Amino acid sequence: MTHAQPQQSHDHDHDDQNGHLRGRKLLLAFLLTLLMLLAEAVGGFWSGSLALLADAGHMMVDALALALAFAGARLALRPADARRSYGYGRLEVLAGFVNALTQFVLVGFIAYEAALRLMHPGAILSGVMLAVAAVGLLVNLLVLRILHGHAHDDVNMASASLHVLGDLLGSVGAVLAALAVRWLHWNWADPVLSLLVSLLILGNAWRLLRKSAHILLEGVPEDLDVGEVEQALRQADGSIRDIHHLHVWQLASGSRMATLHAQVGDGDGGAAVAAIHALLRKRFGILHVTVQVDAGTCTDRARDCLGHGHR
């Protein structure tokens, strides 16, 4: 059984650099969000606006979520040890999963408050509401810009961006509600727009929850087709007779792994193993590969060697 070793040190250094960069971005986003939630909380109580209070509550959850994401990014840099041979990289996926769950709780709170406001509307200071919401919109645009550019499979940064996007939508809703209250005297616009923003947050939260749960269940990365990977491996080297017991999963953001059995012809299979490593790295972005070479009949066939979805 062999493992992929080439460029391992380079890959780890690159991962560490990315991890430190993510950590700095998340810390800055957390500090900006914390300051803005305090401003929106004060402005919401002062003006009597649910949209501002809802956005402040959302930003409070987001500040905690960003702190959790920052902790996840930092802990993910810790090296493997005797108890956790894969390291702590999956902590960032757990952080994304928890962050998604908090969105569902927040949406429930906003919906409850909006229903109360619709039944018992109150006075709103639209000028204060508009000024605070406009500043919040600018701050959220800045934070979203800071977090922009994460890898598509980085669920920790994706969850943080989701929270900030929810803040941004909340600020847009608060600005529109303030304009409606100020110029049209539609006080009902405040809770209604809060509900509309909550629905948008709910959809994004569900997608993030499903994605992070898929990784935690060690599902195949979403942009990979296992059948395509297996077919490519069969053609990686002329000595390969069969590929079976192939499993592909994702440990954390950007950390793809694979195990497989390769039935080869005469020889020690060294050329076939090298070809497998090269193909998986270059074509599918799978850096950690474990290959069991079978010179004859698969020794694990009695234990369902064919595995899931393979011939």
Image (tube, rainbow, N blue to C red):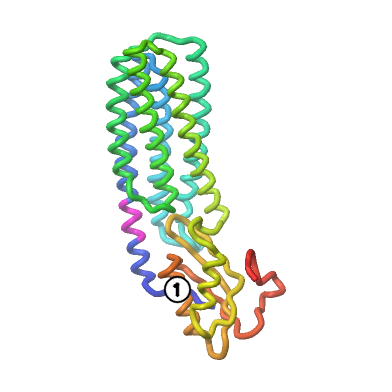
Write down the region rendered in magenta. Answer: 15-21
- Which of the 4 image quarters holds residue 307? bottom right
For the point 46% across and 45% down, the residue is 95
Is residue 30 something one can see in this rendering?
yes
Residue 132 vs residue 182, the one in the foreground: 182
The image position of residue 167, as x and y in percent, is 38, 32
The image position of residue 70, as x and y in percent, is 38, 45
Q: Quick one: label 1, few (<14), some, or many (20+) residues within 10 Å? A: some
- Which of the 4 image quarters holds residue 168? top left
Q: Amino acid at mark 1?
A: Leu
Image position of 75 with respect to 169: above or below: below
Instruction: Work out which residue is located at the far front of the displayed protein and give it.
Output: 184
Prevailing SS of the magenta stretch: helix
For the point 29% across and 42% down, the residue is 145
Quadrant into which the N terminus falls:
bottom right
Instruction: Work out which residue is located at the far right of the displayed protein and give it.
Output: 302
Residue 72 vs residue 252, the one in the foreground: 252
Residue 17 belongs to magenta span: yes
The image position of residue 292, as x and y in percent, is 56, 77
For the point 34% across and 68% down, the residue is 10
Residue 102 belongs to magenta span: no
Instruction: Determine which residue is flagged by label 1.
Output: 279
Q: 128 left or right of 270?
A: left
Image position of 294 with respect to 162: above or below: below
Image position of 275 with respect to 22: above or below: below
Label 1 sits on a secondary structure element that is helix
Image position of 264 with respect to 101: above or below: below
Residue 200 vs residue 160, the one in the foreground: 200
